[in-house]
Image (cartoon, helix red, strand yellow):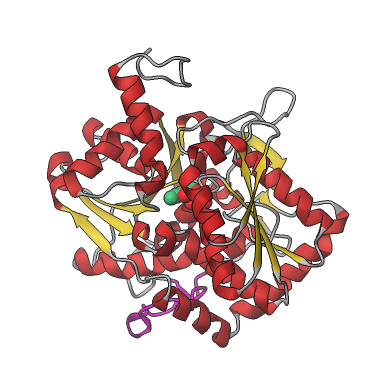
Amino acid sequence: MPSQRGSVATYPRGLSPHMITEPSLPSLSSLPSLMGDPSADGRFGEFGGRYVPETLMPACIELEAAFREAWADPAFISEYRRILRDYGGRPTPVTECFRLSEHLGVRVLLKREDLAHTGSHKINNVIGQALLARRMGKTRIIAETGAGQHGVATATACALFGLECVVYMGEVDVHRQALNVFRMKLLGATVRPVHSGSKTLKDAVNDAMREWLASVRSTYYLLGSVMGPHPYPWMVREFQRIIGDEAYEQSRLILDGADPDYVIACVGGGSNAAGIFSGFVDTNAKLVGVEPAGGAAVGRGIPGVVHGMKSYLLQDEFGQVQEAHSISAGLDYPGVGPEHAHLSATGRATYVPASDDEVLDALQLLARMEGIIPALEPAHAIAYLVRAASSGEIAKGSTVLINMSGRGDKDAEQVMQRLAMCRTQPCEPVCEGCPSR
Ligand SMILES: Cc1ncc(COP(=O)(O)O)c(C=O)c1O
């Protein structure tokens, strides 16, 4: 276990000039953060890197240079923060869940990214990258999406900045996230369904990367998570760091100057988790990422290369990428961002699975106890909390901060069908992981 530093005086936050609440910035330290810059070739430990065809190499290098310059420019940072405040609804609050806490015997706080504009944390990264694209003189944006939240956020930013927007989305996700497809279209984006492979997020990334390769001069690829070739995993984490920076201050106010014992987030590619972890990685808080049981890249994956990065990856004995399965489109991905692979390998964060069934139960529990309907993705974090608090893995009286990465509207129809079909009568044909069988 790497050393952890908990006191305010030594809390090293030198890599983050992006706090919303500047006056209360903790004093800086010369110690580097455990989630600092990657190496010059874009690695976190052995993971990350830039495994792209030669044609994309100049684009990645140009992007890295543009991001470094912008992120050191106070005018860029101030515009990014102004838009997130006046348009994006930041800072999002931290809500204490009194009834759920009493029910579970642990003190539960939620960081409310579900209250950000467009309904999830995705807007933080999208505003940052759209500003960067504009600064680089690009007028056309492509993106991939799973749950549709990144697609909606991208379509939103493109409408705001007057940019052309094309979103790739697997055919399976087009159906299960139909509401978000409609929202993207309303916002003026073109949605391109992807019919190859498992027709989910992995295949949408494949097609977006293929198009980027073909149109790299005119087009900016606005990647939605902490994955892909360098600089994306680092850049997206920096644009999501605002979640952790805010939550660090907010939870200290609620917990009388203490840090939470646990910080828990769901992990698909890993951007909401990276965002909240970055605020607590240098404290004593235990960091827990929750993966879908059917797509546990950290839990069950082995190192491999996909989508331009080296990371943990679900693969068969021949090294072929295996299909993931999750009830939640946003977590249905066989890989994970390389920084999570590194945080796991070093023991600083742990990664645990949650099953579809546990997730459906957790979603209903939070809705009934707190009046908050979570998206299926963060319901994974709640599901782990319920299991761990019930089994004693998380001790009674612990304080737990959960990243509520998005709201449940987009999943209402899917959940309605699943509950109606599978809980009250056997479904036909049998759905994957059917709870009634
Ligand atoms: C609400 C929500 N949470 C989490 C995720 C997973 O993405 P990430 O792991 O990058 O946070 C998604 C992806 O679409 C999402 O919509």
| Of the pair 351 and 116, the residue shown nearer to us | 116
Picture residue at 36% right of the left edge, 77% below the top: 26
Q: Position of residue 415 (x, y in %)?
A: 36, 34
What quarter of the picture does the C terminus occupy? Answer: top left
Q: Residue 139 vs residue 243: left or right? A: right
- Residue 99 percent location from the top left of the image: 13, 47
- Give the dominant element type of the magenta stretch: helix, strand or loop: loop
- The answer to whether residue 91 is visible is yes
Residue 116 on the magenta span: no
Q: Which residues are magenta?
A: 12-34
The residue at 70%/75% (across/down) is 66
Residue lying farthest to the right in this orientation: 54
Q: Is residue 33 visible?
A: no
Q: Residue at position x 35%, y 42% from top? A: 379
Give the residue drawn at x 52%, y 82%: 79
| Image height of 45 relative to 133, above or below | above
Work out whether 338 lies above or below 380.
Answer: below
| Horizontal side of residue 229 vs 384, given as left or right | right
Q: Which percent across, then down, holds residue 206?
A: 71, 44
The answer to if 16 sits in the magenta stretch is yes
Q: Picture coordinates of residue 116 (x, y %)? A: 38, 63
How many badges with numbers are in the image? 0
Image side of residue 103 versus residue 242, left or right: left
Instruction: State the image quarter where residue 225 is shown.
Output: bottom right
